[in-house]
Amino acid sequence: MEAALKYALRFVDLRRTEREIVKYVNHALMIRYYGLQSLRNGFRRVRKGGVNWMVQPRAMSPVGTVIGMEVGDEAVWRRYITEAQAEFLQKLAQQAATDLRNGETSTYGVTREGYYVMSGARAAEISGLSCEAARKRLSRIRKKVRENKARFVPC
């Protein structure tokens, strides 16, 4: 509560009337307090299209965490990507499993549904590629998987 109050008082405009100051401080205090309380409870803020969501992050399978969607059996999705892409994906998935097991999720993004997704910077760190190369390789894999996702689901 103290941190929220310090935040509100730091940005208040003292040229306003008392009523406006009290209204601003009350509003800023509540927003900041609930925001800090949500973070303390393990929630993360997701901003998409100008809208904010507070979500409780959870993990998918390691491959799902890397790709950003649950994909199912490895034998099914592996036939739609190249061997080099499969090795790259497997390396990232192994590290994602380790990170999730150890609770090291600060470098992962969160989807609107609340699932962890590996960032391009984290993929570069793991693979040893430049950030741009790792991000593009990961986006090409995601695109191929997304295009063929309908084929993954058994009829």
Image (cartoon, rainbow, N blue to C red):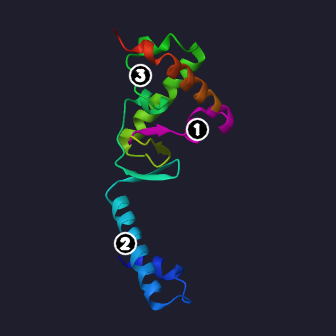
**With respect to residue 124, does 140 lie above or below?**
above
Q: Quadrant of the N terminus?
A: bottom left
- The secondary element bearing badge 3 is classed as loop
Q: Image point 49% across, 29% down: which residue?
A: 67
Labelled disc at residue 120: 1
Task: Tell me how many marks there are.
Answer: 3
Q: Earlier in the sequence, mark 1 or mark 3?
A: 3
Residue at the disc numbered 2:
30
Which amino acid is tagged 2?
Met
Q: Say if mark 3 contacts mark 2, CB within 8 Å.
A: no
Labelled disc at residue 135: none
Which amino acid is tagged 1?
Gly
Asked whether 120 falls inside the magenta stretch, the response is yes
Measured as percent of width and height from the top left, residue 108 is found at: 48, 43
Q: Quadrant of the C terminus?
A: top left
Point out the stretch of residues depicted in magenta.
114-135
Give the crowd class for mark 1: few <14, some 14-19, many >=20 residues within 10 Å.
many
Spatial CA span between label 2 and label 1: 35 Å
- The secondary element bearing badge 2 is classed as helix
**With respect to residue 71, does 79 lie above or below?**
above
Foreground mark, 3 or 2, reads: 2
Measured as percent of width and height from the top left, residue 70 is found at: 40, 26
Give the crowd class for mark 2: few <14, some 14-19, many >=20 residues within 10 Å.
some
Q: Image point 56% across, 35% down: which residue?
A: 123
Residue 31 vs residue 119, the one in the foreground: 31
Q: Earlier in the sequence, mark 3 or mark 2?
A: 2
